[in-house]
């Protein structure tokens, strides 16, 4: 028997009803009751058909807007997490449909320009609305409130995913303890997640995705850094012992860590690495932090991205004037036609700036743009959804006036 079969998320699990619960019932397809797809399969297809998922192909993983087609972008990272979590869950006897759905959705809230973009938006958010911004929480908000799909009647609705998938999205961030990772027992309101380390995920499957997220990037980022010629021979020589054991390439590192995790994990101890593997993984993470993520070659682009995002925020936020905000936006549309038209169009999905046609919308109203905090929060959410390519394009149109 696979070691974790007895705690897999299925109908026999005492958490099952909580995990498959949604904020409201999904609509029934016009051809009759859906019997082909499970609850998590429906979540999977809803995620991969939403716009936030489509945009991941043009969002940074580590290196900004790379010209080299073989450098990892956010969509490839998501695919790696899906593959790794599927392998682990399958080996342990857990629900691979649930890990698959969490994996494809886990980074929907990520910003343009990777973790540097996240830091920039966090700085803006704290400064302007006194709220922290982090991509796990933003991902939950996207799937609950901002990503819209049309039903069979053409009505726009929120994604309305299961609790288990939404919990996995907001719970995927952060490191995991050496002593082992276990899911929490409490069925909490997910808005109570006020930080990435406050709670463990609710299911074993979400814990697997949390670990797979860490495994996925370690070796791949080193491979990319070698391709980008960031690393010198003496940098890699410092890891001769590691190189001899598992070889510094993404496939070997992933295999080594996945096998070690599956061999050392038990229901009693939790998802756990051997001491050796845990030490190797942390040394590789430390190496990446020191030699890649803080490399001087990235600093000009970080300053560049900071300028982009702050300038776009300032242009939009300067138009706030309570009831006159939309009028002010329309007044500057002649200078920035695409930027302003896109922003007003996006706002119209989540606010009452126009009289809503109830025959076209059945989603939540998120903003009252006559209130300053609401309006500034809307700008932050809007910027977070942009791709690297789009934000650079928009900024270039602004300076070509």
Image: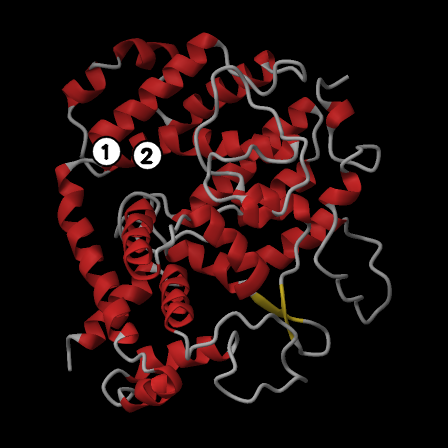
* Left or right, 153 with reference to 335: right
- Is residue 4 visible in the rendered image? The answer is yes
Q: Position of residue 89 (x, y in %)?
A: 64, 29
Q: Given contact means CB atoms under 8 Å apart, are the residues at marks 2 and 1 in contact? A: yes
Q: Which residue is mark 2?
A: 221
Q: How is the image coloured?
A: secondary structure
Above or below, 297 relative to 180: below
Please name which of the two marks, 2 or 1, marks the residue nearer to the observer.
1
Q: Nearer the viewer, residue 91 or 357?
A: 357
* Residue pictured at 32% horizontal, 18% vertical: 283
Which image quarter is the C terminus in? bottom left
x%, y% of residue 330? 33, 89
Q: Is residue 20 above or below residue 290?
A: below
Which image quarter holds the N terminus? Answer: top right
Note whether 104 is above or below 269 in the view shown.
Answer: below
**Element at badge 1?**
helix
Query: Can residue 248 be seen?
Result: no
Above-or-below relation of 79 to 306: above
């Amino acid at each position: 028997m696979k070691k974790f079969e007895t705690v897999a998320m299925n109908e026999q699990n005492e958490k099952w009803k909580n995990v498959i619960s949604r904020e409201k019932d999904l609509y029934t397809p016009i051809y009759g009751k859906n019997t082909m797809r499970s609850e998590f399969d429906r979540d999977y297809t809803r995620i991969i058909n939403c716009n936030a998922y489509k945009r991941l192909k043009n969002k940074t993983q580590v290196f900004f807007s790379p010209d080299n087609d073989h450098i990892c972008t956010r969509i490839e990272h998501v695919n790696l997490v899906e593959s790794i979590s599927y392998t682990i869950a399958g080996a342990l006897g857990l629900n691979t449909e649930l890990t698959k759905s969490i994996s494809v959705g886990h980074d929907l809230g990520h910003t343009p320009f990777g973790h540097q973009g996240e830091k920039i938006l966090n700085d803006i958010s704290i400064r302007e609305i006194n709220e922290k911004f982090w991509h796990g929480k933003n991902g939950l908000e996207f799937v609950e409130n901002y990503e819209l799909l049309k039903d069979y009647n053409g009505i726009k609705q929120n994604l309305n995913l299961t609790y288990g998938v939404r919990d996995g999205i907001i719970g995927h961030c952060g490191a995991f303890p050496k002593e082992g990772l276990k899911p929490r027992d409490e069925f909490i309101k997910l808005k109570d997640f006020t930080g990435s380390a406050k709670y463990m995920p609710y299911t074993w499957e979400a814990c697997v995705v949390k670990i797979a997220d860490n495994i996925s990037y370690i070796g791949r980022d080193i491979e990319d850094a070698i391709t980008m010629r960031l690393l010198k021979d003496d940098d890699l020589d410092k890891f001769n012992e590691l190189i001899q054991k598992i070889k510094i390439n993404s496939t070997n590192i992933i295999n080594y860590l996945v096998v070690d995790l599956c061999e050392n994990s038990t229901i009693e101890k939790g998802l756990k690495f051997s001491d050796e593997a845990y030490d190797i993984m942390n040394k590789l993470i430390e190496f990446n932090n020191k030699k890649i993520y803080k490399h001087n070659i990235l600093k000009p682009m970080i300053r560049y991205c900071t300028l982009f995002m702050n300038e776009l925020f300032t242009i939009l936020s300067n138009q706030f004037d309570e009831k006159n905000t939309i009028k002010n936006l329309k007044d500057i549309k002649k200078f920035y036609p695409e930027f302003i038209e896109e922003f007003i169009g996006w706002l119209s999905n989540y606010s009452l700036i126009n009289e809503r046609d109830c025959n076209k919308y059945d989603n939540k109203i998120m903003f009252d743009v006559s209130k300053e905090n609401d309006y500034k929060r809307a700008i932050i959410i809007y910027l977070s959804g942009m791709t690297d390519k789009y934000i650079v394009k928009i900024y270039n149109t602004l300076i070509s006036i």
